[in-house]
Amino acid sequence: MAGSSGHLLLAAASSGRRLAGWNVVGRPTEPLDARGETMAKSFYSHIRDAWKDPDDGKVAELQWQRMQEWRQQGAIERVERPTRLDKARSLGYKAKQGVVVARVSVRKGSARKVRHKAGRRSKRQGVTRITRRKNLQRVAEERATRKYRNLRVLNSYWVGEDGSQKWFEVILLDPNHPAIENDDDLNWICDDTHDDRALRGLTSAGQSNRGLQQKGKGTEHTRPSNNSGKGRGK
């Protein structure tokens, strides 16, 4: 089969044509079955491809309609089903009892500081150019876990943004629900060591923000924390 594929590629190259599913160096660009033929793409693959460029195509039109509604809603809204089903599934979401999805909006930009009324000249006010030490996704997870105190954050993902805010969907689990306690894929979160994991920076977004998703040269001061490294880790 490999030899026949090579002959086909050579014939296509000599004629100036490219075979569908193969690139110019003879490697498949799409998944192949046992016979070397292109496999049918799954439902989740189509969703994933559509979200690769959310500002173009049908997704852009849907996002424009969604944001009209999101702007009129509150900062934290519970949703019935994920906006990005493929992303939610890859992060552990399951359509079962004990699993909750909440959409959180976070304002973009640097921090807002109150100006001092006296005692400082304008240059020393310390109001502008003050940025957060947390990324917006981590802020969204913390706000969700503060509202739903009986739930624990599993993970989160981006679903949209405009000029002033970003929206994230946060997956939360009920550690006391029998459906979660009996699920071998999710019951690890029922352990008490995972209580308030979003507030302690133990989620994926929190670890990324703390510099714990990298290792090797240049990360000597990030572990066990940035405070222990006196701020030299980032």
Image: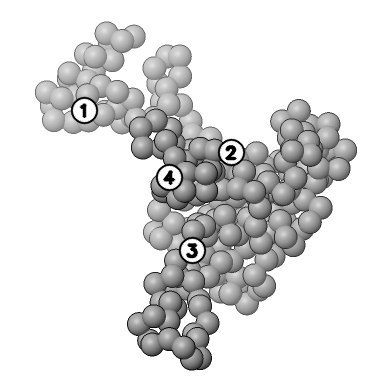
N-terminal of the pair, mark 2 or mark 4, is: 2
With 95 as the anchor, is 159 left or right in this view? left
Residue labelled with disc 4: 233
Q: Is residue 146 above or below residue 97?
A: below
Residue labelled with disc 3: 132
With 80 as the anchor, is 135 left or right in this view? left
Which label sits on residue 90?
2
Residue toward you, 142 or 132: 132
Question: Residue at 61% of width from left, 72% of height from top?
Answer: 69
Q: Is residue 174 above or below residue 180?
A: below
N-terminal of the pair, mark 4 or mark 3, is: 3
Residue labelled with disc 1: 24
N-terminal of the pair, mark 2 or mark 1, is: 1
| CA separation in Å, label 3 and label 1 | 46 Å
Question: Residue at 68% of width from left, 46% of height from top?
Answer: 197
Instruction: Tell me the SS state at disc 1.
Output: loop
The N terminus sits in image quarter: top left
